[in-house]
Every structure is written in C-alpha cells, then in structure tokens.
Image (cartoon, helix red, strand yellow):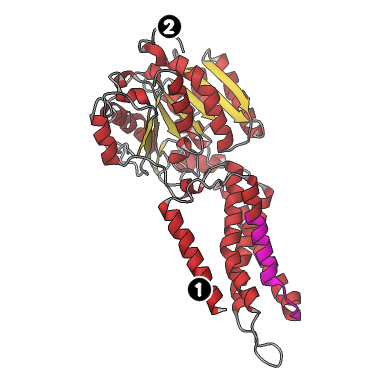
Amino acid sequence: MAVAWVAAGCAVAGIAQAARAGALDHVPLLDHAVGAGAEAAGGGLLLAAWWSRDRRWITRTLPALLLSIAGVVGLAALVLWATGTVNDAYPPSFALWVGAGFAAIAGCPLVLRRRRSGPAPHRAPAWRRAAAVVAVPVTAAGAFMLIDQQYGIWPQIGDVLGHSGALDAQQAHNLIDGTATPGGHPPAQGVIADLDAPATRSHFQHRSGVVFLPPAYFGPDRATLPVLVMLVGSPGTPINWLKSGHGQSTDDAYAAEHHGRAPVLVVVDQNGSATGDTECVDSPAGNAETYMTVDVPAFITGTLQIQHSSSSWGIAGFSEGGTCALDLVLGHPDIYQHAIDFGGDARPNLGNPQQTLQHLFGGNVAAQQAHDPARLMSTRHYPGVTLWFGAGADDTRGIAVGEQLSAAATHAGIVNHRFVDTGGHNWQFAGTGFARVLPQLCDEMVVSRLSPAPGRPGRL
C-alpha cells in the first residue's frame, strides 16, 4: 500500500509540473464530455469511499453526514440569496456538487479513522481510505467544471492558471515605444500586453488590466485608432474578455479583413477583486467611477498614445460590466459615446433596493437617481451616442431588461440596437454577441477613417 501512495504522489507531482510548464494549457474545460467524466469519477469515488457493511456507519454516521451537509448547503444558499451576494441563478445540480465536495471533505476523516466499535479496533480497507482522499479534489473539480461550463469563464486549463501569453509590462512598453515591429512592418496578428491603468486621481484599489493592440497599432496611425474599454462582471477577471469572451480572436479576425485596423481593447478592473461589485460608482468601496472616467482615459491617451475622441471611444461590458458600460456612457458622453451592454441590469444593483442605496450611494437618493439609466435618458439629450442591448436566448431576465432599456432609449431619440443571441447569462453568449456587434460598432466608431487600400470602399 505504501508503494501505491508513493506512486500516487509522484503522479500528482508530475501533473503539477506539467501544468506549471504549460503542457496542459490547451486541455478544454468547456467540453461536456470532460465535465461529465470528472463528475462521474467524483461520484464513483464517493460511493467507493462510503461503501461499508458496518451497521453503525449505514444507519447513523452516513445519514447524519448527509443531512448535515444538506443543511449547510441550504443555509449558505439562503444567506447568499437573502443578502444579494449572489444574484445570478446557478444550475440546480451545482448545489448537489457543492454538497458532494463538502461531503467528501467531512467524510474523509470519518473513513480514515480507526473505529473502536465491536470486539477490537479496526480501520476501513485501504482502497476505501484511498478513495476517500482522492474524492476530495475530484468532487471539487466536478463542481468547478459544472459552474465553469454554465458560465464559460475558463475555456482551457491555461486560462485557470493565468497563462495568457501576454507580454509583461516592460516588454509592452518597449514595443509601444517603437513605431513598428522589427522589419518595419506591423505584425500579422495583434498583441496582448499586461498593462495597468494607474489610479492616480481616484486612488481606486484595483487589479492589473490587460490590453489588446491590433496590428495597425504598430503603424504610423496608432493615435487615431478607436478604443473599446471592456469590463467583466462579478465574479470575473480582466483576461476573461480576451479569452472567455474571445475578444482577442474576434478583434484579430476583424483586423485581418481590414488591413490591420480594429479597436484597441482596454480591459480594466472596475471591481477591485474577483468577487467585488462596485457598479462603477464612487462609493465607500472606492472611487470606481472616477477611475473609469479620469484615470483610464489618461492611461489611454498617455501610455497608449491614442488621441481622445468620444465618437470613437466606447465601453463594452458583460453582466455587471454591462450595467457599468451603459451608466458610464450616459453619465459621461463627453468621454465615451458607445455602450455595449451584454446582459446588464436596468440600473446599479446589489441585490435589493435598500442594500443598493446604502452600500453604493450612502443613502443619498439624489446620487442614486443620477445613475439611473432610464431617468438619465428621459432628462438629457445624447447626440452622437449609440447603445447596444444584448442578452442570451436563455436569459429571460436579460431579455426583459434589454427591451425596457431599448424602449427608453428609442423614446429619448437615442440610436440603439437590441439583439438576442444563443446562450444564457454566460461568456458563451458574450463571445458570440461581441462577434456579432463588432462590425457594425466599428462602422459607428468610424474605424475606416484611415485611408482604405486601393479598390476597397472606405466604409467598413
């Protein structure tokens, strides 16, 4: 048995080393067969660990364990729902797999311990003890993959490990400081770079962002390229837009058909943490709105060397990021004139009205009203502004919000587009939605104001 444990340890160490080296980066996580395999393995290991003819185990210990876990999971779900910590609906089976993970953790020491019932102390067979230990990470992986497949957050293992392939800050600055890549020609594809927009004015605590620079950025006309600031939701990390939402490949594909010209994608962190939720307002949690409207534009014009033009600057956001995109454009059309709202709320929202008013606006009703999109559209004029409202076909709430906001925009005379695409409230929808929106958005942002190639129309 000792040899088996040593072999298992060596196998785990080998897998960990391969993961660190990037050998597993392209293993798909959104393949349903992979997820089903992990869940089946977790279920099988739990059954193996708990299989026993011990009467006390069957009639007392195991039922007590299962009832306790069910109570803990149910109570946690109730608290998260009541406090507004989690607003989005998880798949029903997710609670089952979270419970399975807790059961594996709690049940492991029960299986491993020496039992003193009966005429002499005894232990569970070695195969049951091994199954109990291995069941812990495998059931956790099953729960992780279930929620990942629901929302499409990490398409591959490399995305989980943070292997984005991005240039580090020094490499990016060296590249930006040159007028072109070696050889004097723009690269065939765009470049991802880890670049952070410093919070000089807002002092907002945030995570480092990432930018995608299309090929034309490395030519002589970088200053006139359009800019699309991109915001993830909560939970989320900046790289999600480029990887999970396929922002990199979509922008690259567009650039390939338009002589390297495409929007510069600037993905910043408006939340401060993976589970933070600022709704992009200045609040006791931090000056997120000032960060988005002062510090980020200064970074774009300064570090990225792109001229400000509100008519060719926009914001795209998914979920809470979509709420932010709409609110920021309506609140600051002199900075951004285009908003793409993928599945956002009708207004800044932390789960319930009282909690939203207190935590976001410090009880200031006037400040809350100043961030209500419907109210803003009914009281202000927005010449030149264009709005997009999108939702997944399975996201009934998102569809209803989009209809409501689109009607308000139309009534106010604001150019707007509403669409429903495949998917639900997840990154699969955000990715297909972005690919759908980008060509017409680029027309509205006048990407083709640079001279077109001979024989090609100037309008994209």
State if disc 1 and disc 2 touch (CB < 8 Å).
no
* Residue 211 percent coordinates (x, y): 37, 34
Q: Is residue 50 magenta?
A: yes
| First to last magenta residue range | 38-55
- Other-residue count near label 1 (Cα within 10 Å), few / some / many at <14 / 14–19 / ≥20: few
Return the residue at label 2: 455
* Residue 203 percent coordinates (x, y): 30, 41
For the N terminus, the image quarter is bottom right
* Residue at the farthest bottom position: 119
* Residue 35 percent coordinates (x, y): 62, 50
The image shows a total of numbered marks equal to 2
In this rendering, the answer to whether 117 lies above or below 391 is below
Quarter of the image for residue 189 reads top left
Quarter of the image for residue 231 reads top left
**Amino acid type of disc 2?**
Gly
In this rendering, the answer to whether 117 lies above or below 350 is below
Tag 2's secondary structure? loop
Q: Is residue 272 magenta?
A: no
Main SS, magenta residues: helix
**Amino acid type of disc 1?**
Val
* Residue 74 percent coordinates (x, y): 65, 57
Q: Nearer the viewer, residue 28 or 62?
A: 28
Return the residue at label 1: 6
In this rendering, the answer to whether 189 lies above or below 50 is above
* Residue at the farthest front position: 183
Residue visible at 30% across and 31% down? 299
